[in-house]
Image: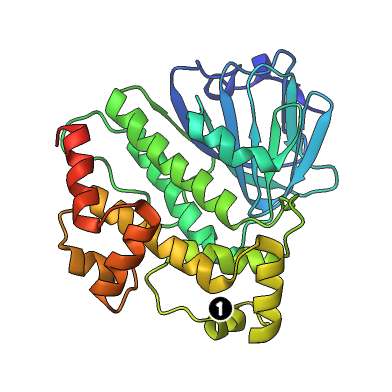
Amino acid sequence: MPVRADALPETAAPSPPPGLVTVGRFDERPGYGVHRPRGADSWLFTWTTGGTGQLTQGATGTPAGAGDLVVLGPGVPHRYTVAPGARRWTFWWVHCQSRPAWTDRLRPYLLGDRLHAVTPVPAAVRDRLERSFRRMLADARWTGEGAPPAGEPGEPGAGRVAVAHGTAARELALCSLESVVVLTTATARGAADRSGVDPRVRRAEARIAADPGAPHTVATLAAEVSLSASRFAHLFTGQLGQSPMRALLAARLLHAARLLEATDLPVERVAAAAGFASPFHFSRVFRQRYGTPPGAYRAGLRRRTGM
């Protein structure tokens, strides 16, 4: 039977203060459970590494298996337990205040009642997530003197809990948690694309946006999503309203504009980094898109910002 939070050991009861970052790793057997009838004042992030848990928030519930990130927002009654029939539940957990950008990333995975289930996270990224949680546990113990403690080698002991009291320790721990949120929401396949766009087109679009300077062609993009070049071009154009090469040109020009804004690279190197073989062609299409040559674009921006 689940136990109430005020009956648990002090490290887990009843809910950490909202201003702290508290992180731990538990390995629990049947009979373990937490019930908070008023919810928590902070967000709770759980990442399961073994066995199965069951988390319920308000009227919404979800199981959590290996590789699942489940996030409970504050202020809603919740309980979490070893799932019925499971032999154990091994999981990392973090209580903290969520950064504003995280709610946007988590929104596609909302099941209801401020409960988000980011699943399934590919096995290929789970080692990196494990390292992020271990780093959180180490950084939360930092006093601010000397170097932060090294992460624990091997398997962290079950029941390990750390509280980040200092400002620097909290920020370091939150940075590791942010990498968890970004990596899981970017790679999980559980959120449906409600736009109706074919997922192969979305993958190609994401590939262009991630590396616009690469030597993409219709043929290489089509091969990456297992389509013929003609079928891919027809599908991409029909669903996004522009051809793959027009989308690539737009992505390269945007990338070039960001490089002009953020670096002192010469225009020729900006052109090359953005995937343009000819600086003259780059200058011409950049002017068509932004109404001014690349050098003047950078100079105008710096006058406006006082840089």
How many tags in the picture?
A: 1
In the image, 139 versus 116, the foreground residue is 116
Can residue 101 be seen from the camera position used here? Answer: yes
Q: Is residue 25 left or right of residue 240?
A: left
For the point 19% across and 63% down, which residue is it? 267
Label 1 element class = helix
Left or right, residue 90 beside residue 297: right
User: Label 1, on which residue?
Assistant: 221
Relative to 237, say whether 30 is above or below. Answer: above
> Residue 115 sits in which quadrant?
top right
Display colour scheme: rainbow
Q: Which residue is drawn at 27% across and 42% down?
A: 149
* Residue 147 seen in render: no
Q: In this view, does 136 lie to the left or right of 71?
A: left
Where's residue 216, x and y in %? 46, 78
Spot occupied by residue 222 in the image (x, y as percentages of width and height):
61, 81
The quarter of the image holding the N terminus is: top right
The C terminus, quarter of image: top left
Query: Label 1: few (<14), some or many (≥20) within 10 Å?
Result: many
Task: Identify the residue shown where x is 37% and y is 59%.
Answer: 288
- Residue at image point 42% right, 67% down: 211
Residue 236 location, quadrant? bottom right
Disc 1 residue type?
Leu
Foreground residue among 172 and 307: 307
Q: Nearer the viewer, residue 206 or 2?
A: 206
Point out residue 67 in the picture as x, y percentages from the top left corner. 63, 54
